[in-house]
Amino acid sequence: MPKPETYAHAILHMIQQGETPKEAVSRVHKALEAKGRVGLMLQVAHAFRRLAQKDADKNRSLLTVAREKDEHAARNAAGAKDADVILDPTLIGGWTLEDKGMRTDASWKRSLLSIYQAATRT
Amino acid sequence: MDTSAIEKIVKEIELFAPKGESSHVGRVTAVGDGVCAIDGLSKAVMSEILEFEEHEGKSLKDSMQHEGKLYGLILNLEEDSIRAIILGDSARVSEGMIVKSTGKILSVPSGEELLGRVVNALGEPIDGKGPFKKATMMPVERESYGVIDRKSVSVPLQTGVKAIDAMIPIGRGQRELIIGDRSTGKTTIAIDTIINQKYEPEDTRPICVYVAVGQKESKTARIVQQLKDNDAFSYTIIVDAPASAPAALQYLAPFSGVAIAEYFMDKGKDVLIVYDDLSKQAVAYRQLSLLLRRPPGREAYPGDVFYLHSRLLERAACLSEAKGGGSITALPIIETQEGDISGYIPTNVISITDGQIFLESALFNKGVRPAINVGDSVSRVGSAAQTKAMKAVAGTLKLELAQFRELEAFMQFASDLDKATADRIATGQRMVEVLKQKNGSPMPVEQQVIDLYAAVHGLFIEVPLSKVKQAEAQWLEFVNASRSEILEEIKKTGKLSDEAKLDLNKATEEFRVAHKELFS
């Protein structure tokens, strides 16, 4: 028996294919009605929220810089003009960019750590 | 920090120009009991190694204090997430942690450098002797060799245990199960076999790999010491996944062991691998499968527990000359409950292997050690690899012992038995005495042949039962002193010539005269 997540996936897929949210929800509602499982709609809604959030996160560009003043240079270097920016002083310098499931790490912390690891490896 | 390390760092700083390093990433959404769920990583593949990014949000100083990298292994690919087992301390993983895809399949180091070393299931040294410098990485999961690449088993693997070499012979490339209840001597047989390889010529001596799964650390330490004391550690590698290790490592250890062994087999060498034991590996795999929410089957084991063992044991092989002629002989161990060999895992492994050595608590408690039940033990391919000398002396041994076991029940009516039956019982009793062997004292094959020759030719029939072991020791001493050329011939050719037989018959007569006190 399909889980609420499966119906939520179906709604998201239909919307991405160009259907209006109302149409998509009504089609899923009909399908659930036919199976006598309308009570599942609330859980489908929760699952859809989680799924949509995950989807939005996946498509979000996130640029992390060590200091506020590095933002401009980091945007240019990372080629991330529209990315959201957050501060993380532990990076020491440089930046990291998370975009579409890829993470590019050009932070000083990573470089310093790799130097330390190379030097202390016996 | 020493000056050389400081110099290295200074040089690195001078050349410092940070470049971006890109990787596919996901985030941990749930973690517990050595298993975690991860979102993202849409391009991940099955059995891929993942690296947990522990440095995020931590200062450089804190990051420097981490003890090595933490890895995971993907075991489930689901619709919109993946599940992985954590290859290390799962307390180091937290929700929201970044996980990097490595694009690599799990591999372990192997090579001559590993000989005489103790490693964990990931191939990392745990004996404090430092890291490996020139090791070759071998994939933990690899397809086994096909039919064309194999040849029939033809070279014997001497265990040094008389009862096995005579009646349940093992060939190089064979898979022989050692099965029995707890404390019946399963590990002892395996360790004696490893020790016995020291009698083999160095160029043909099998490399030994002992994989300890779910064992007590004290037991593994004792085994290491025993191997060292017997000069057997220099050609042995220990892979240790103790009872305290996470289930993921206990599941992986046998695969890591065979990956290490395959390096030597691919180089044309013979390898002996002991899996001690596969029932504990099956339990670890059951734990992981349940945590990964795979459907449970019989006794809650997952449906692929047969495949777990079959794909492991299929990697034991005797390769054709075209493939270098190397071999892996596998001695898997299975622990039974109350002697029940019809359990799920025992029957699975019995059906996969080429025979089994069945050890019985009742025999063990009677003082018959090794406590091998000759009737239930079998070697399906080993007889093709048995030396001619051994075949000549042990041809009817198994049958005679089986007959003795049947007649044994009538021993309490000894006074009413006819002479033929009484003689058969007396012979059987002496044969059982001869086949007894002390823990940690494997016997070279030429000595076994001499010993069994005397036993099957009735030398000990007139010796009182209590003096059989003494007579046996003296007989071996006598032949070693007076007929050493026969021993040399057996060792060199593997045959017992007619002249040698005549000479041995003469020797038995001389022995009777020289040791009258033994024959009453």
Image: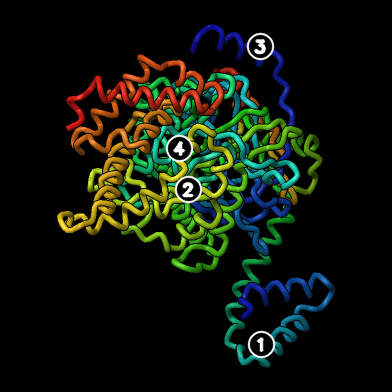
- CA gap between label 4 and label 1 equals 69 Å
Q: How packed is label 3: few (under 14 Cα within 10 Å), some, or many (20 or more)? A: few
Of B122 and B449, nearer the camera is B449
Question: Where is mark 3, residue-wise?
Answer: B11
* Quadrant for the C terminus of chain B in the image: top left
| A47 vs B322: above or below | below
Q: Label 2 is placed on what type of residue?
A: Leu
Given the current orientation, which residue lies at the most extreme left position? B415
Question: Where is mark 2, residue-wise?
Answer: B177
The answer as to whether the residues below labels 1 and 2 share one chain is: no
| Residue for point 70% across, 60% down | A56
| B113 vs B363: above or below | above
Q: Which one is closest to the eye, mark 4 or mark 1?
A: 4
Estimate the x, y position of residue B258 in percent, counting from the top left. Answer: 57, 39
Q: Label 4 is placed on what type of residue?
A: Asp
First in sequence: mark 4 or mark 3?
3
Q: Which one is closest to the eye, mark 1 or mark 2?
A: 2
- CA gap between label 3 and label 1 equals 67 Å
Q: Which one is closest to the eye, mark 3 or mark 2?
A: 2
Residue B62 is at least partly visible in this image: no
The answer as to whether the residues below labels 3 and 2 share one chain is: yes
Q: Chain of mark 4?
A: B
| B144 vs B138: above or below | below
Question: Where is mark 1, residue-wise?
Answer: A32
